[in-house]
Amino acid sequence: MNRITALDGLRTIAIAMVVAYHIDNELVPAGHWGVPLFFVLSGFVITGSLCVEIDRTGRLDLGSFYRKRLLRIVPALAVVCLALLAVGTAWSQVQPSIGLYANYARTEGVALGRLTHTWFIAVIAQFYLVWPLVIAAIPARRRAPVIGVLAVAAIIWRVVAIETMSPGWVYNATDTNAAALFVGAFLAVARPRAPRVAVAWALPALLGLMLLPVFGDSGRFVLWGGFVALALAALVLLYAATGPAWLENRLLLRIAEVSFGIYLWHYVFVRSDIPLWVAVLATGAATAASWWLVERPLVQWDVRRRARRSEPGKLLLPTPAP
C-alpha cells in the first residue's frame, strides 16, 4: 500500500489525546477516544499492507510479519517492565504486561499500577497474532463483504456486551475492541466515500466532543459514547487518507515516529509521585533513550538482516485464489 504520510500525523493526534487524558481527565474527559482512533488507524494500515503483500506475491510471509511486530513491541516494553521491577514493582503487575495479556488481567480485577496502560498494547498484539490468518483465508474479491460482515458483527457484539458484560470487560477486552479494528480494516479494503462535509468536520468534532464531561462519565454511558468516537474516528481516517498537508507537518511526523515510546513511558511518570513538569521531562528523556538505544537499532538490524539473505525457510502461508 502506498504510504499515506498523513496517517502518521494522525497517530500523533491519537497519542496526544490519550496523554492529555492521563494527565488531566477532568480537563479532557473523553481523551480516551484516542484509543478507538488508534484502533481504527491500526486496522486500516495493517489490513492494507497485508492485502498488498498477498496481491503482489500470492502468499503471506507470516514469519516476517510476526518478527517485525515482536521487535517493534516486546523489547521496548520489556525495558519499561525491567525498570519498574528495579524500583520495586511486583512481578504480579509486570507479568500480564510482558505476557501481552494485560487487558484480560484487568477484566479479572488485577491492579497493574503504572503498567495499567499496557492493556492497549495487549489488544494490538492479540490483533496482530490473529488477523493475518484471517486475511490470508479470505479471497481477494470477497474481502470487502467478509470484513464488512465481521465489522457489523463486532459492533453488534459490543452492543450486547455493554448490556451483559461488566464495563471493565467492554473497555479492555479484545473481542469488544474488535469493532474499531474491523472498521479500520473495512475502510482499507472498501475505501467507501462519505459526505465531504462530514469528513472535513470529523476531526474538529472529535476533538471538541472529547472535552464534554458527559462522554467521560463512568459506567455504561461512557461505553455507549464509544460508538460516537468510533463513527468519528472512521470519518477522521477517511479525511487523513486524503493526505491533508497539515498532518504531514515535520513535527507531527517526528512525534509519530517515537509515539510508542511516548505511550510506554508517559503513564509510568505521570502516575508517579513527582511534579508534572518533571514527569514531562522524564518522559521525553526516556522516549529518546528508547528510540535511539532500543527501537531504532533493532529495526535497522532487522533491515540489514533481511538484506543480507533471502531468508530460506521462512513461513509462507498460501492464500486462496482471487
Image (tube, rainbow, N blue to C red):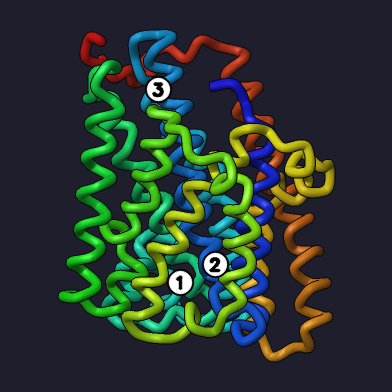
Q: Nearer the viewer, mark 3 or mark 2?
A: 3
Q: Are marks 2 and 1 in contact (CB under 8 Å)?
A: yes
Local secondary structure at mark 3 = helix
Location of residue 229 with respect to 309 vertically, above or below: below
Q: Are marks 1 and 3 in contact (CB under 8 Å)?
A: no
Residue type of the residue flagged with mark 2: Cys
Q: Position of residue 17 (x, y in %)?
A: 63, 65
Q: Position of residue 310 (x, y in %)?
A: 51, 10
Q: Nearer the viewer, mark 1 or mark 3?
A: 3
Residue type of the residue flagged with mark 3: Cys
Residue at x 73% of width, y 59% of height: 287
Location of residue 136 with respect to 81 vertically, above or below: above
- The residue singled out by tag 2 in the image is 81
Local secondary structure at mark 2 = helix
Residue 227 picture quarter: bottom left
**Mark carried by residue 156:** none
Q: Earlier in the sequence, mark 1 or mark 3?
A: 3
- The residue singled out by tag 1 in the image is 94
Mark 3–mark 2 Cα distance, whole angstroms, equals 34 Å
Residue type of the residue flagged with mark 1: Val
Q: Quadrant of the C terminus?
A: top left
Count the marks: 3
Q: Position of residue 14 (x, y in %)?
A: 61, 57
- The residue singled out by tag 3 in the image is 51
